[in-house]
Image (cartoon, grey):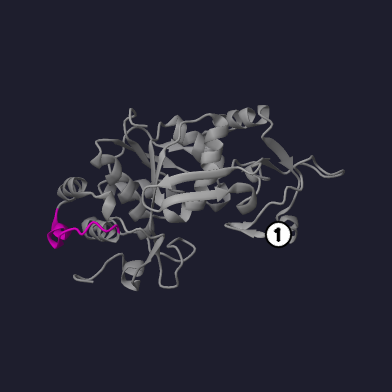
């Protein structure tokens, strides 16, 4: 890790426009990479066509440009990476780590305990499909794997996969590849050295590390930022009706994202040009100042309008 050039990334899903929570992740990953003289890539995680919003990918890129983000290299689209994901499945298959599952979601929910992200798969199909059942999804065996890692903001993390998650899906019943597999393959392909993203994805990290080990891929470092929450304690998202970022006056919103991340930007930065804002923010960036929290509740003024009044 110490001999590799720092390379970060921002990987939005095109399910809708960017909102303040998305911006926090983009700002954190961008400044972490740039403050270390590293590169920053953009990847479009368009793995799930039924959930995608028409035109959202282009809208996201236009918003990033309006906010002054400058990325390195070409945009990678996961929808064009099917062959790479199938090759990774072949490696898992050769290791005996992969098996077909014929269970429906209802069957799993009816026969399992609740884990960190819903029902824990009970291993029903581990020994093979029952008579008369056909394959639906592909799962990877977890076999009591314990994943222990250090997150640069959230601290030491430890997960027992079989107990907390169960054997997890790497290719879905609808034929689409699962996020956990795709992100691991793509991070390795793009040479990503650090993953800076919201803490809402912290529970995904043990599965990704497990797949990295099975596939023999280099592990990146992890930094999970506090997630932006509404007053109900829900993560800002399209589902929770977070307002899209306006493109007309980006610097005050960038200022607020920086303040959210504990960087204490001076008030005069609100009226700076984009270029001056980014230059100053990269120099002043401090990982040590990021709040050691999994989430921070925002006032309605930010959730609805992406702004805070001076002094709030």
User: 21 and 79: which one is in front?
Assistant: 21
Percent position of residue 83, x then y: 57, 29
Residue 109 placement: quadrant: bottom right
Quadrant of res 35: top left
Q: Is residue 187 visible?
A: yes
The foreground one among 108 and 132 is: 108
As drawn, 93 above or below 252: above
271 within the magenta span = yes
* Residue for point 59% across, 28% down: 87
Q: Residue at x 23, y 58 (%)?
A: 255
Q: Secondary structure at mark 1?
A: helix
Specify the quadrant that holds the C terminus. Answer: bottom left
Where residue 102 appears, as percent x and y from the top left, is 76, 46
Please give left or right for residue 224 compared with residue 143 in the image.
left
x%, y% of residue 150? 42, 46
Residue position marked by numbered label 1 in the rendering: 109
Q: Is residue 99 magenta?
A: no
- Within-10-Å neighbours for mark 1: few <14, some 14–19, many 20+: some
Q: Residue furthest left?
A: 268
310 or 55: nearer the viewer = 310
Q: Left or right: where does residue 170 sit relative to residue 38?
A: right
In the rendering, at what x and y percent does residue 22 appear?
38, 54
Q: Which residues are magenta?
A: 261-272
User: In the drawing, does residue 296 fall left or right of residue 46?
Assistant: left
């Amino acid at each position: 890790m110490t001999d590799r050039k720092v390379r970060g990334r921002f990987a939005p899903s095109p399910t809708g426009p960017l909102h303040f929570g998305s911006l926090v992740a983009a700002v954190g990953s961008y400044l972490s990479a740039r403050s270390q003289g590293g590169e920053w890539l953009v990847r479009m995680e368009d793995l799930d066509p039924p959930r995608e919003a028409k035109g959202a990918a282009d809208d996201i890129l236009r918003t990033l440009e309006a906010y002054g983000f400058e990325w390195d290299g070409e945009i990678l689209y996961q929808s064009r990476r099917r062959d790479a994901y199938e090759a990774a499945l072949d490696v898992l298959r050769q290791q005996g780590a992969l098996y077909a599952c014929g269970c429906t979601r209802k069957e799993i929910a009816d026969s399992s305990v609740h884990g960190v992200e819903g029902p824990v798969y009970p291993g029903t199909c581990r020994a093979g499909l029952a008579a008369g059942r056909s394959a639906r999804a592909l799962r990877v065996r977890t076999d009591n794997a314990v994943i222990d890692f250090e997150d640069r903001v959230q601290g030491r993390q430890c997960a027992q996969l079989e107990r907390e998650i169960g054997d997890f899906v790497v290719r879905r019943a609808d034929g689409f590849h699962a996020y956990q597999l795709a992100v691991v393959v793509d991070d390795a392909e793009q040479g990503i050295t650090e993953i800076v993203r919201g803490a809402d994805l912290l529970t995904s990290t043990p599965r990704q590390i497990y797949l990295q080990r099975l596939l023999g891929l280099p592990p990146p470092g992890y930094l999970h930022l506090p997630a932006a929450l509404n007053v109900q304690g829900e993560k800002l998202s399209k589902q929770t009706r977070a307002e899209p970022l306006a493109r007309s006056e980006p610097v005050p919103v960038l200022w607020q994202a920086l303040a959210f991340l504990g960087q204490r930007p001076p008030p005069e930065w609100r009226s700076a040009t984009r270029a001056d804002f980014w230059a100053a923010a990269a120099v002043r960036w401090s990982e040590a100042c990021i709040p050691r929290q999994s989430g921070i509740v925002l006032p309605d003024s930010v959730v609805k309008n992406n702004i805070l009044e001076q002094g709030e």
